[in-house]
Amino acid sequence: MRVARGWWLALVAAAFVATGVGVIGAGGSAAAQTETTKPTVREIAITGPVDPFIARMAKRGIRDAQSSDAAILIRIDTPGGLDSSMRGIIKSIQQSRVPVICWVGPSGSRAASAGTFILVGCPVAAMAPGTNVGAAHPVGLTGDVLSDKVTNDAAAYIRSLAQQRGRNADWAETAVRNSASIPAEEALQISVIDLIARDVDTLFTALDGRAVDTAAGSVTLRVAGASVHKVNLTFGEAVLHSLFDPNLAFLFFVLGMAGLILEVLHPGISVPGVVGLLLLVTSFVILGTLPVNIGGLLLLAAAFVFFVIDLKVPGHGLPTAAGIACLVVGGLYLYDASVPSARVSRGLLFGMAFALAAVFFFVVRVAIRARRAPLWNDKRRLLGVEGAVVEDLDPVGRVSIRGESWRAVLPEGAPANVPTGTRVRVREMKGLTLEVEPVVDDRPGPSKVGEI
């Protein structure tokens, strides 16, 4: 019994040892897996104009990166964009609790206008060879006072961003006031950026182990060999971003109004009205994301009011001329002049003005004239006109009026039968049937135009 009990204790002890070894082995394996797991970086691409849809994507990407404790890479290649969208992106960068890296790349990219502000205001600023930064002057069209006010505000803002990040604030202000633009190598020499990297892998390797300021304090970057997950625009954002064009908004508005006018002139066609309504709604969606001047928009609407007035109450072309003038002036001042990228192309504006002038002065006026011309079979034109019976009226037959054969009927109380050749006069028109009565006249031959 003692031997058996000894063997039993030995087996239990061995089991505990084996279990402990297994746990330790498993723990060691898990630890090794944790140590070898690649770091994650969320990539946000700011390409094309900086608009509300790019800003919304950037904010969403920064928010998601913070929830997963991942670093953020913002890849920049933009000609500029809206001030409000740019400031929204910069504010999200400044409030981020995870490191944010901004990189202008790949080679051939640029960080112009709004892109300059974003790069200067980023905790880590890098550029690829063959890229440039600058040209951040807010160009205006409405006068020196507004231009100076906007320029001073932009200069103060970019200087504060550069000072916050320890960058060359004097050059940053020069980029705003004088539209200065420099390549990546010069930007590094004068302390506008932190480093030059030809690609993302090189960038991550160079930054690995560097301390970066965040809203939560200083964080050490661990991004060498990181796995990059791209943040994409949603389908709706992608569509609207592709349509984010001041020229498209203007074009859709003009074509939409023209479609609605065509539907009013020719009710029942439906297609111009539906297409016009869709274009008009789309233009309002785009205009809602652009710095629109209400005065310019009202002038565009007034242009089409003048067009309709000229079609409904002919004024020898004067209302159309007034409409064309409203269209041109409204197009020139449709957008806030302080936003350089928001303006209507002169070629498009004057081309549309010329096309609408041609349409409303010639094509539509001819169509309206033809539409208003009295038809030969108009009821008012046929009443009282005389003709001849070509098929006995008993009481229904056929008559010839002005060379055309009509179905005819006798009125109540008329003779039961009116033979062929009898002259008759039109009393009433009921649809395509004429109500006629015999003409009592002793004069020979037709008394009126009768048969022709």
Image: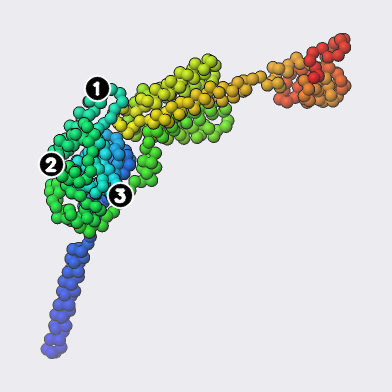
The answer to whether 226 is drawn above or below residue 368 in the figure is below
Amino acid on which disc 2 is placed: Gly
What is the tally of numbered marks visible in this picture?
Answer: 3
Residue 96 at least partly seen: no
The residue tagged 1 is 145
Which mark lies nearer to you, 3 or 1?
1
Where residue 345 is drawn, which disc sits there? none
| Residue 156 x %, y % | 17, 32
Amino acid on which disc 1 is placed: Val
Residue 143 at least partly seen: yes
| Residue 159 x %, y % | 16, 35
Label 1 secondary element: helix
* Residue name at image x 22 percent, y 62 percent: 37
As drawn, is 114 to the left or to the right of 422?
left
The residue tagged 2 is 166
The residue tagged 3 is 231
Q: Nearer the viewer, residue 218 or 333?
A: 333
The answer to whether 10 is drawn above or below residue 258 in the figure is below
Label 3 or label 1, whichever comes before in sequence order? 1
Q: CA distance from mark 3 to mark 1?
A: 41 Å
Q: Dot 1, how many residues are within 10 Å of its Cα: few (below 14), some (14-19), or many (20+)?
A: few
Q: Nearer the viewer, residue 383 or 222?
A: 222
Q: Quadrant of residue 245?
A: top left
| Residue 205 x %, y % | 19, 56
